[in-house]
């Protein structure tokens, strides 16, 4: 059979043409609007709506050109009306009687009159919308599954956020979900252990069946023999590849060493290198002081090692020789005076012409100079003690001379008195 049904884009009226070429206009919008109240109150219509609202699995809409629905997966599907009609087309007619009824004639020429309820006549779409809204509110259920965050404390007493998966049912009752219970319901117990002696893995499944994997066999033919070694003294990384070819990576340029070797003038690579730096050095300090040209600042004591100590002064003074320093001799002040006049420096003190002079000044051995100064200090004390003893002896002699002189004066006074009295 050849029939057509066409919708006017402006009036939204459908025109149905049967096999005989007869045309029938179907104004569904006007008919439904005019008899909306009768339709919506019809028990059959209400049952259909209830069935749709409570069991609907998709959402069918009309966009003006096509019918579109969303399937169970949320994907958009377009309904081709023409194809549907061609696939199930039969010889039927639907005639508008213009009195609120339609006459439908099926393939067997049996006619059925469709009466649009009068209660929908001259009604509005708002009544229909209100009815649909009421049905939805009666049938729908509101549930939710959210992460509820509450304040709590860990085992160390630190404040933390406690997350609880909470399901709220249709009655608004919150039901916290115990994750551990869910996990126990589906968890399986398996283990995997490593044996360092046999170099194997042991896997035990849920049925307590153990399977061993020999790692040596697993490596098999893909294993390669390589070696990577670190040369600490030379600061080099030595790599030997599968072909026994040795590759050396010099790490010295990579390491930023602030101390330089006096031999190579490059970063020192060993803890027994002779090293130097041209910058300021602070030990216990982070910044230099206000002293001009300061190169070393130490917050603490300095301990040095020397081959001798200035006690050799006392050894030679009291014993006549020193085992600490064999070439030392204590000099009297006359000898010291003669040495100073000749050499213009103290004996035992490094003269200036033996020092190294740099652009910044003279360089000298601080440890050696400290011993020399201690030597002069001890000598000075000994000379002072000698002078003290000499002064005390002279004071005693002067005392005796004064006493003798006083005795002579007393005798002269007596003689003068005797001579005057004769």
Image (cartoon, rainbow, N blue to C red):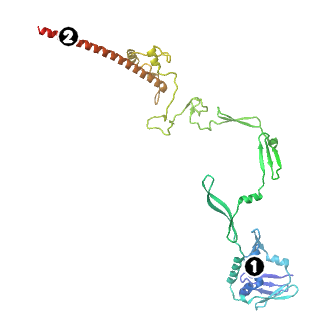
Q: Residues within 10 Å of mark 1 (few under 14, many from 20)?
A: some
Residue 2, position as x, y percentages in the image: 85, 81
Q: Along the line of sight, which residue is nearer the eye, 323 or 209?
A: 209
Disc assigned to residue 50: 1
x and y, in percent, of residue 113 in the image: 81, 89
User: In percent of the image, x 38 and y 19: which residue is there?
Assistant: 385
Q: Residue at x 75, y 75 (%)?
A: 54
Which is closer to the viewer, label 2 or label 1? 2
| Vertical position of residue 108 compared to residue 367: above or below | below
Q: Is residue 329 visible?
A: no
Disc nearer the start of the sequence (2/1): 1
- Label 2 crowding class (10 Å Cα cut-off): few <14, some 14-19, many 20+? few
- Does residue 68 appear left or right of residue 385 in this picture? right
Outermost residue to the bottom: 99
Q: Nearer the viewer, residue 146 or 75?
A: 146
Vertical order, 325 against 422 (above or below): below
Percent x, y for residue 241? 75, 37
Q: Which mark is residue 411?
A: 2
Give me the residue at 63% from left, 61% from top: 149
Residue 86 is at least partly visible in this image: yes
């Amino acid at each position: 059979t050849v029939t057509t049904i066409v919708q006017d884009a402006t009036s939204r009226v459908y025109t149905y043409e049967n096999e005989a070429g007869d045309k029938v206009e179907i104004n569904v919008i006007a008919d439904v609007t005019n008899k909306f109240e009768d339709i919506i109150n019809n028990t059959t219509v209400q049952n259909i709506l209830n069935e749709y609202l409570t069991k609907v699995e998709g959402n069918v809409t009309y966009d003006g050109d096509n019918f579109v629905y969303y399937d169970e997966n949320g994907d958009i599907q377009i309904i081709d009306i023409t194809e549907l009609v061609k696939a199930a087309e039969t010889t039927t007619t639907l005639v508008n009687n213009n009195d609120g009824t339609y006459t439908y004639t099926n393939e067997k020429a049996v006619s059925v009159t469709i009466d649009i309820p009068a209660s929908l006549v001259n009604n509005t779409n708002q009544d229909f919308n209100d009815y649909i809204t009421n049905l939805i509110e009666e049938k729908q259920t509101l549930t939710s599954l959210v992460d509820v965050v509450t304040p709590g404390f860990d085992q160390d007493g630190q404040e933390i956020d406690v997350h609880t998966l909470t399901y709220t049912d249709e009655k608004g009752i919150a039901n916290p979900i115990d994750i551990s219970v869910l996990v126990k319901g589906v968890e399986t117990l398996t283990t995997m252990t490593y044996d360092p002696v046999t170099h194997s893995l042991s896997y035990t499944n849920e049925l307590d069946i153990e399977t061993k994997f020999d790692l040596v066999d697993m490596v098999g033919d893909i294993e390669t023999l390589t070696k990577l070694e670190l040369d600490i003294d030379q600061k080099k990384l030595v790599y030997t590849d599968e072909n026994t070819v040795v590759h050396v990576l010099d790490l010295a340029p990579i390491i930023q060493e602030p101390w330089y070797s006096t031999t190579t003038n490059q970063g020192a690579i060993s803890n027994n290198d002779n090293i130097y730096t041209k910058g300021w050095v602070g030990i216990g300090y982070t910044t230099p002081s206000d002293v001009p040209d300061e190169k070393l600042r130490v917050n603490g004591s300095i301990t040095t090692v020397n081959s001798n100590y200035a006690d050799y002064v006392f050894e030679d003074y009291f014993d006549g020789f020193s085992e600490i320093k064999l070439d030392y001799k204590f000099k009297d002040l006359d000898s010291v005076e003669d040495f100073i006049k000749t050499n213009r420096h103290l004996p035992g003190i490094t003269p200036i012409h033996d020092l190294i002079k740099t652009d910044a000044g003279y360089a000298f051995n601080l440890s050696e100079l400290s011993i020399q100064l201690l030597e002069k200090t001890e000598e000075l004390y000994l000379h002072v003690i000698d002078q003290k003893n000499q002064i005390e002896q002279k004071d005693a002699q002067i005392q005796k001379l004064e006493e003798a002189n006083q005795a002579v004066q007393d005798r002269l006074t007596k003689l003068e008195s005797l001579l005057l009295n004769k």
